[in-house]
């Protein structure tokens, strides 16, 4: 067996998820996660500052969103650019081979307040990154903020649908559908 194996962060995340399911988040240590992944504790800390972060890949997700938004056609409006960013996220992170992992990850988050809080903070950071990226594209601050927050809501709806056990549709189409529904709901007059 080779001594070095690639994708230490992915292996650590998979090991952590297994252990969180088996023993609970509170009852799992960094040392146990590293051992299950076949790595050392110091390798864990090279990739993650603490065990709360092992299920969150915020930097890569942010990069994918911002790149997807930046690659939207120059004439695209803010919400259309957000749709392109969500498509990019579907191509890079919410792929068919990650659906089962994402479903399991969400189940672990759902039963742990600390992890749900971390998830909420990460989403706020991602929304702030979208706001900045939209503003750099020329959207006024308020427009950028509204578009980013509507995009975050569409992302949440699409993600819930994507991890649904009966769903086979890709994240990108689900995100575009959710964004259209959010747009329609925002346009309702009473």
Image (cartoon, rainbow, N blue to C red):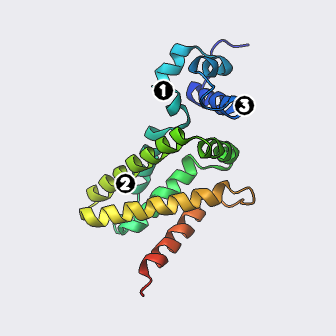
Give the labeled residue for mark 3.
Answer: 22
For label 2, the SS is helix
Q: Earlier in the sequence, mark 2 or mark 3?
A: 3
Quick check: marks 3 and 1 in contact, CB under 8 Å? Answer: no
Q: Residue 141, position in %: x, y?
A: 25, 62
For label 1, the SS is loop
* Quadrant holding the C terminus: bottom left
Task: Locate residue 3: give its quadrant.
Answer: top right
CA separation, marks 2 and 1?
24 Å
Q: Earlier in the sequence, mark 2 or mark 1?
A: 1
Question: What numbered label is drawn on residue 48?
Answer: 1
In this picture, residue 140 sits left or right of residue 167: left
Residue at 69% x, 29% y is 23
Q: Residue 78, position in %: x, y?
A: 36, 66
Q: Is residue 73 visible?
A: no
CA separation, marks 2 and 3?
36 Å
Which-is-in-front pick, marks 3 and 1? 3
Question: What numbered label is drawn on residue 130?
Answer: 2
Vertical arrangement, residue 19 with respect to residue 127, above or below: above
Q: Foreground residue, 160 or 20?
A: 20
Q: Is residue 40 visible?
A: yes
């Amino acid at each position: 067996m080779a001594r070095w194996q690639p994708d230490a962060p992915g292996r650590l995340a998979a090991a952590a998820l297994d252990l969180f399911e088996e023993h609970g988040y509170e009852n799992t240590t960094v040392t146990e996660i590293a051992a299950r992944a076949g790595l050392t504790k110091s390798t864990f800390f090279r990739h993650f500052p603490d065990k709360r972060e092992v299920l969150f890949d915020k930097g890569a997700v942010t990069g994918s969103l911002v790149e997807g938004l930046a690659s939207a056609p120059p004439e695209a409006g803010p919400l259309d650019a957000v749709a392109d960013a969500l498509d990019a996220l579907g191509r890079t992170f919410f792929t068919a081979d990650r659906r089962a992992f994402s479903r399991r990850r969400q189940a672990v988050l759902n039963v742990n307040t600390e992890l749900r809080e971390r998830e909420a903070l990460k989403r706020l950071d991602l929304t702030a990154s979208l706001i900045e990226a939209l503003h750099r594209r020329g959207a006024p601050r308020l427009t950028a903020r509204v578009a980013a927050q509507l995009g975050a809501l569409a992302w949440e709806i699409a993600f819930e649908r994507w991890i649904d056990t009966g769903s086979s549709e890709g994240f990108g189409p689900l995100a575009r559908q959710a964004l259209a529904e959010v747009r329609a709901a925002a346009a309702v007059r009473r």
